[in-house]
Amino acid sequence: MERMNWDEKYQKGEVFWDKGQPAPPLKEYLERHPLRGRALVPGCGRGHEVALAVTHGLDANGLDIAPTGIAEARARYPHLAERFVIGDLFDPPEAMRGAFDVVIEHTCMSALPPSLRTEYRRGIELTLKPGGLLIGVWYINPDLDPGQEGPPYPFSVSDLTALFTNGYVILEDYVPEVAFAGREGRERLRVLRRVG
Ligand SMILES: C[S@@+](CC[C@H](N)C(=O)[O-])C[C@H]1O[C@@H](n2cnc3c(N)ncnc32)[C@H](O)[C@@H]1O
């Protein structure tokens, strides 16, 4: 399957997913759970979740395959510019391999067609240390027009459970009460610990 040209989306300004601020459920989660260590935001786009993680004491990096997205993240958060890295989660830079205590998911997995989900899990495992946390605001049920397939691609809670069935334990799992407008009730906050 041909992979989507994400950079073109940024070049054309067709960045419908960007809300100009970090995801409210993640903000709420980090306010309640003080964490330390290195964190990765795969598919970080314009970088709002990286900025949030740094504000909450994490030593965070963002990784994105789209050079224009990374340039826009650096322009939006110039004090964090060096934290934003161009690269592919499926073949992460050497320096990111096995380097992170926390991976933060926000609309990276839902951007990928179902055929790439095992690659996504592999990408998480190439970067997240055993024992580390995968904290996700999983966009389970996006609001699609009739006939629209994605991205964002819907997936069920059981799809999510099946994808991370071996080697992970669920630490928290709930439908967040806070959300961007239009995403209320469509997301799942699930935190997994990598045990394998
Ligand atoms: C829907 S956007 C979400 C961006 C950001 N998380 C946000 O919420 O604003 C998906 C992002 O994933 C990036 N992406 C897609 N495939 C990727 C891959 N294999 N490795 C790294 N980034 C990827 C895209 O370039 C895009 O910025």
Image (cartoon, rainbow, N blue to C red):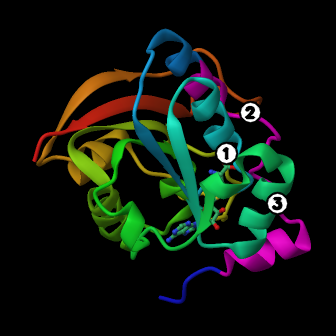
Which one is earlier in the sequence, the residue at label 3 or at label 2?
3
The image quarter containing residue 31 is top right
Along the line of sight, which residue is nearer the eye, 34 or 82?
A: 82
Residue 123 percent across, percent down from the top left = 35, 64
The image quarter containing residue 92 is bottom left
Q: Specify whether tag 3 is near ligand 1 (CB below 8 Å).
A: no
Q: Residue at x 54, y 25 (%)?
A: 57
Circle 3 is placed at which residue position?
A: 72
Task: Identify the secondary structure beneath mark 1.
Answer: loop
Q: Residue at x 67, y 64 (%)?
A: 148
Q: Is residue 6 magenta?
A: yes
Q: Residue at x 44, y 38 (%)?
A: 136
How far separated are the C-alphas under marks 2 and 1? Answer: 8 Å
Circle 2 is placed at which residue position?
A: 182
Circle 1 is placed at which residue position?
A: 143
Name the amino acid type tagged 1.
Asp
